[in-house]
Amino acid sequence: MDFSLSEEQRLLVATIRGFIDDELRPLETEIEETGQLADEAADRIRARSQALGLYAVNIPAEYGGGGLSVLDWMIAEEQFGRTSDILIRRAFGNVYEILLAGTAAQIEEYLLPAVRGERTFSVAFTEPEAGSDAAAISTSAVRKGDGWVLNGAKHFISDGLYSDFFIVTAVTDPAAGARGISTFILDKGLPGFTIGRDQPMMGLRGTSHVEMRFEEVVLDDGRLLGEEGQGLKLALATLGRVRLAQVAARAVGKASMILDSCLGYARDRRQFGSAIGEFQLVQQMLADSAMEINACRLALWHTASRIDAGDEARGAISMLKVQASEMLGRVVDRAVQIYGGAGYCRDLPIERYYRDARISRIYDGTSEIHRMVMARQMMKGDVGLFDIYEQAG
Ligand SMILES: Cc1cc2nc3c(=O)[nH]c(=O)nc-3n(C[C@H](O)[C@H](O)[C@H](O)COP(=O)(O)OP(=O)(O)OC[C@H]3O[C@@H](n4cnc5c(N)ncnc54)[C@H](O)[C@@H]3O)c2cc1C
């Protein structure tokens, strides 16, 4: 059990931090004001990230990705958490591993261009009437000849305006429940496929979240991703690691950055003749945040190591999703308090961090749903979740 970072891991962290501090964070204020990242800036940061070897680090090297272990990927994602959602998407790619389940032709047409940064895609599962209950979707794909006809609607689909294809869930066998759902790859621009409104959100400025409609969209058989009826299973098998990365690891990185900023402010800001960091009630807030971040980081590294060792770690991923997103909420709430009025004022980014953090407890499965998954895993005897000594036999 060695918790020290290797030379390569230190270099990875330093390279990402330097890139984010020098080239990404300076773009954040403008994105917040205009609501968008200019295409020219998006191309520039992607090219720079590719030159540094930081694009699609989660995808195996044989497909052109970074080929990082899950632990190293989480260490990288922690650093990504130091900037905003849209900048992470454009600079580091958002290449979901679900495409690794594709056929050779799908890998050629979709995965490889995504890893090269030539194509962008999103996952579209949620519907107005089916959010947490992902098996209750009504989008349907009906067999017709040697293809499919898709009808239905999705909403809240992140990055939908920029993406040029989507992984979409649809019911292919209404009698089979959760086993009657399949995933398809849909190219933007197909007849009958409409991208609707960009739904306004509390935070995450710069990232679009769209409604979409499918009206008699004709798909050839080559658009079915994975096996028919295995769509939800495929999503569950591949999106867990994404949750660990995009929610838990980024929350740990974001919270660390926010705590650093609070420490600086607590040293500099003076009231009653003292730095506010000298007041014990402020010290308690700093100490509580440090304790919580530390606990989450160790749990993250432990879970990542378990996955690298071949464990699915489903319960532990759910635990981290809840633990880290709720930790971030408390850390950023304390940050607003420590900064006082300046924390609430838009002149500083603290209020933005507060708004942006709120979604972590909702998307990629709400805290309530992940608590249920955790408890179910525990009832099934997923001992690694709460007693690692059990693993020693
Ligand atoms: C900014 C943003 C980005 C998103 N990006 C995407 C995306 O890219 N792709 C995509 O497919 N989806 C995306 N989503 C959708 C997101 O995953 C869902 O919003 C989320 O899963 C919750 O579903 P819901 O909003 O329908 O809430 P509901 O499922 O209606 O839940 C409402 C409340 O009821 C609770 N609840 C529901 N069922 C239970 C239960 N059994 N027990 C206890 N409590 C329960 C929930 O925890 C929640 O508190 C995004 C959403 C947002 C807001």
Image (cartoon, rainbow, N blue to C red):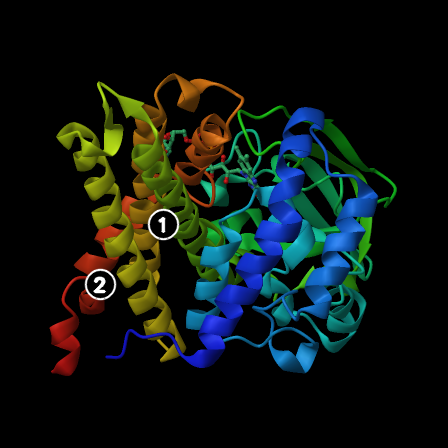
Q: Position of residue 204 (x, y in %)?
A: 57, 34
Q: Position of residue 350 (x, y in %)?
A: 45, 30
Q: Amino acid at mark 2?
A: Leu
Comparing 317 with 332, the one in front is: 332
Compared with 114, 200 (above or below) is above
* Residue lying at 58% horizontally and 43% vertically, measured from the top left: 85
Comparing 142 with 9, the one in front is: 9
Q: Position of residue 162 (x, y in %)?
A: 76, 43
* Residue lying at 56% horizontally and 29% vertically, measured from the top left: 128
* Residue lying at 54% horizontally and 22% vertically, measured from the top left: 347
Q: CA distance from mark 2 to mark 1?
A: 13 Å
Cβ–Cβ below 8 Å for labels 2 and 1? no
Q: Does any portion of residue 168 appear in the rendered image?
A: no
Dot 1 lies on which element?
Answer: helix
Q: Amino acid at mark 1?
A: Lys
Badge 2: how crowded within 10 Å, few (<14), some, or many (20+)? many
Determine which quarter of the picture holds residue 47. bottom right
- Which residue in the structure is indicated by mark 2? 385
* Residue lying at 14% horizontally and 67% vertically, measured from the top left: 387
- Which residue in the structure is indicated by mark 1? 321
What is the quadrant of the N terminus in the image?
bottom left
**Along the horizontal axis of the image, is 256 left or right of 281?**
right
Determine which quarter of the picture holds residue 62. bottom right
Instruction: Return the disc, 2 or 1, that comes first in the chain's sequence.
Output: 1
Q: Does any portion of residue 202 appear in the rendered image?
A: yes
